[in-house]
Each structure stands twice: as structure tokens, then as C-alpha cells.
Image (cartoon, rainbow, N blue to C red):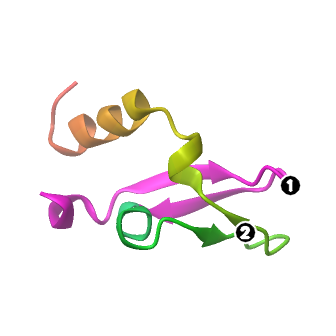
Amino acid sequence: MGDDLDDILAQAECPRCEREFSIRYRTLRLERTVDCPGCGETIRPIDDTPIGLVQKLIDEAQGGT
């Protein structure tokens, strides 16, 4: 199932510089950390994302509401 959703883009916000940027679900699934493109801070967006929001993105990708 994970491979089917790899192209979904999630929005993230850096807690340090507050810059918003997009992350592919594949990156979250495999790497779990990203570097902010603004300040270079390493963040773990999956820790700060409510599971309900992740489920909503999955449902939308599968054509549900």
C-alpha cells in the first residue's frame, strides 16, 4: 500500500524558521527526517503530524472523503 501513496505531498513547517515546504510521503515513510530548505534544521515531521491528518490524506488519495 505504501508505494501507491508515495507521490502524495504533505505540507510541513519548520519549527525553527517557520518556513513551509512540501515533503513526499515516500520521504516520510523511508527517511523520517528532512532538512529544512530554509535554515537546514533537521526535523521529524511525522512526530508532529496528527494521525488523523495523515489518514485524511490517504483517504483523499484513494478517492474517499
> Helix, strand or loop at disc 2?
loop
Amino acid at dot 2: Cys
- The residue segment tinted magenta is 1-24
Q: Residue under label 2, please give it.
A: 36
Q: Is residue 57 above or below residue 36?
A: above
Q: Residue under label 1, please give it.
A: 16
Where residue 47 appears, as percent x and y from the top left, is 55, 46
Question: Along the horizontal axis of the image, is 48 left or right of 58?
Answer: right
Q: Residues within 10 Å of mark 2 (few under 14, many from 20)?
A: many
Amino acid at dot 1: Arg
Question: Along the horizontal axis of the image, is 64 left or right of 19?
Answer: left
Determine the image quadrant of residue 51. Answer: top left
Question: Along the horizontal axis of the image, is 2 left or right of 25?
Answer: left
Does the residue at mark 2 contact the one at mark 1 (Cβ under 8 Å)?
Answer: yes
The span from disc 2 to disc 1 (Cα, nearest Å) is 9 Å
Where residue 57 appears, as percent x and y from the top left, is 34, 40
- Residue 14 is a magenta residue: yes
Quadrant the N terminus occupies: bottom left
Question: Along the horizontal axis of the image, is 15 left or right of 27?
Answer: right
